[in-house]
Amino acid sequence: MSENTLEIENLHVEVEGEKILNGVDLEISKGEVVAMMGPNGSGKSTLAKVLMGHPAYDVIEGEVRFKGEDVLELEPDERAHLGLFLAFQYPKEITGVSVSNFLRTALNAGKPEDEEVDPVEFGELLTEKMEMLDIDPEFANRYVNEGFSGGEKKRMEVLQMAVLQPEIALVDEVDSGLDIDALKVVAKGINELTDDEMGTLLITHYQRILDYVEPDTVCVVIDGEIEQKGGPELAERLEEEGYDWVREAAA
């Protein structure tokens, strides 16, 4: 077992008695992008939520391990402290809390009191990350996601990744609803953040984001199972032929 790899083995999940995942096996390592594709309802977002500990989902079989820890035994905040991060498909508004205060609080949450980042140091870090993502400095003073466009909400998710520096980022349909300019900015952030210290699971319906983020591995989920794995050429085939050929191959 590698300390740098999130290992998912034979994961079976149900919600309210309905089976959603049917034996998922997957590895996500630091320094790589794993793109997960599949039709609506195939279980992609379910996997991300289960990995972060959403209480609505029941794991009935399987293991998830990272850095020697049984992830499924940990509370959501413990998973975050371990190095996991979820970029939401539908980020929530937090009225009355500025982006700056939110991110500084989140950054310090997992640190001992004597290691917390002071306001000046944090301001420098936030400015650096916002410049990297081409985000207006005034963004830091706005309330989290309040009045944000779809593109701004997704930039906020990537900004959180940049500031919090997780080890494994689960990015759930960050390309949904983005125009081409916002898509390029978000893709740039994912590319710059995915390095030897961070791996990315990029969940998407569409090949278009993979024009800007080149995955190391592409996996296709159908009815809660990973039916195909390959390189970037697999996403290109899906764009041309859709998912029917995957279903036929699995039959």
Image (tube, rainbow, N blue to C red):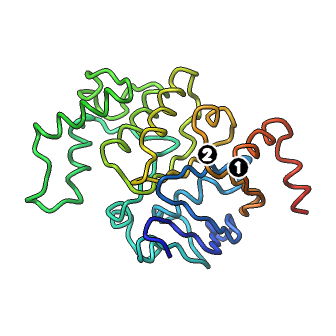
Report how far apart the C-alphas of labels 1 and 2 lie in the structure. Answer: 7 Å
> The C terminus appears in which quarter of the rendering?
bottom right
Q: Quadrant of residue 76?
A: bottom left
Q: Is residue 15 left or right of residue 126?
A: right
Q: Is residue 230 left or right of residue 109?
A: right
In-front residue for pair 157/92: 157
* Position of residue 159 measured from the top left corner of the image (x, y, whole percent): 36, 37
Image point 54% across, 57% down: which residue? 48
Residue named by callout 1: 231
Left or right of 129, for residue 185 = right
Residue 96 in view (yes/no): no
Q: Which residue is found at the position 26% from the left and 22% from the top?
A: 137
- Residue that numbered label 2 is attached to: 215
What's the amino acid at mark 2? Pro
Label 2 residue SS: loop
Mark 1 or 2, nearer chain start: 2
The answer to whether residue 248 is seen in the rendering is yes
**Residue contact between numbered discs 1 and 2, judged by CB atoms under 8 Å:** yes
Label 1: element kind: loop
Residue occupying the point 86% across, 55% down: 247
| Image quadrant in which you'd find residue 115 | bottom left
Q: Residue at x 54, y 69 (%)?
A: 7
Residue at the farthest left position = 114
Check disc 1 and give the amino acid type.
Gly
